[in-house]
Amino acid sequence: MNRIRALYSQAHVTLLEMDHLSLSSVVSAAKLFLSQERVLHGLVNNAGIMATPFEKTKDGYEAQWQTNYVAHWVITSHLLPILLDTSKTLPRGSVRVVNLSSSGHYSAPKGGINFEDTALPNASGMTRYGQSKLGNILHAKTLNNVYGPDSFCSENGDGEIWSAAVHPGLVGSELAARAALPTWMKIVLAPYMALGGKMDGDRGSWTSVFCAASQEMKREHSGAYFQRIADPAGWQSSMAKDAELAEKLEEWTRREMKTGGWER
């Protein structure tokens, strides 16, 4: 926040604190925001951990699954009403939700999402990561189907939200600080990084910023999987394109969040 103010002295920046390993914390943050604000133009679901050792949260979910997917679903769910209300006062496409995903979604388990046990205790950290990142893509597509430019919600005048899933590329961040990456991935990444394939945090954010705010994003790109930089034709797995899987995931998540008391 201080670095932003140093660059832009007139910037109005505030902190909304939450812990994705505690869903009650996420709900509390959403309620605090709604008690203080009347408009919301965009939401970038950016929090993430990668290939971390197996861990379950106090809420009963595997840590990557909850941090990367479930908590983002919860905060988005609680903020949907204010996003929709804001969109009614603005030109179409002015209000957007962006989910940070990854090419790592290709590492998701067979079938995409293991609904019988999303914790995947016997799988690798990358497999659990892949499942969570696949969840981000499917969630963005569900948002587009329900609230996007061709949705009944939009046609009925109830508001319109554009959504996108983003693979930002290899970015120099702390995402992989605790990652237990497989040997083959380290071998593949080493020459890529040596040739300058890794971006700094500023450039790595460009696609997310484009999807959140650029006037060049088109209505037909809502629900798309973007890859660096601002390319809406990102390479995605067949599971990421599976509409039935997206619907099943949404049903599973709503049921789970209702049972736990975290649903809006």
Image (cartoon, rainbow, N blue to C red):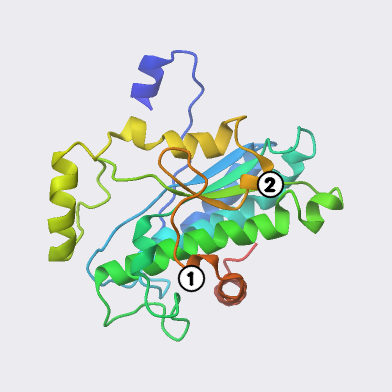
Is residue 262 rendered to the left or right of residue 16?
A: right
Q: Amino acid at mark 2?
A: Ile
- The residue closer to the viewer here, 145 or 231, is 231
Q: Nearer the viewer, residue 174 or 202?
A: 202
Residue receiving disc 2: 161
Q: Quadrant of residue 3?
A: top left
Residue 88 or 182: which is nearer the viewer? 182
Q: Quadrant of the N terminus?
A: top left
Label 1: few (<14), some (14–19) or many (≥20) C-alpha neighbours in 10 Å: many
Residue lying at 25% horizontally and 72% vertically, measured from the top left: 54
Task: From the image, tell me which residue sits under label 1.
Answer: 239
- Write the residue at 39% across / 80% down: 110
Which of 104 and 234 lies nearest the eye of the viewer? 234
Q: How many marks?
A: 2
Determine if residue 220 is in view.
yes
Horizontal and vertical percent for residue 129? 33, 65
The residue tagged with tag 2: helix, strand or loop?
loop
Mark sitting earlier along the chain (1/2): 2
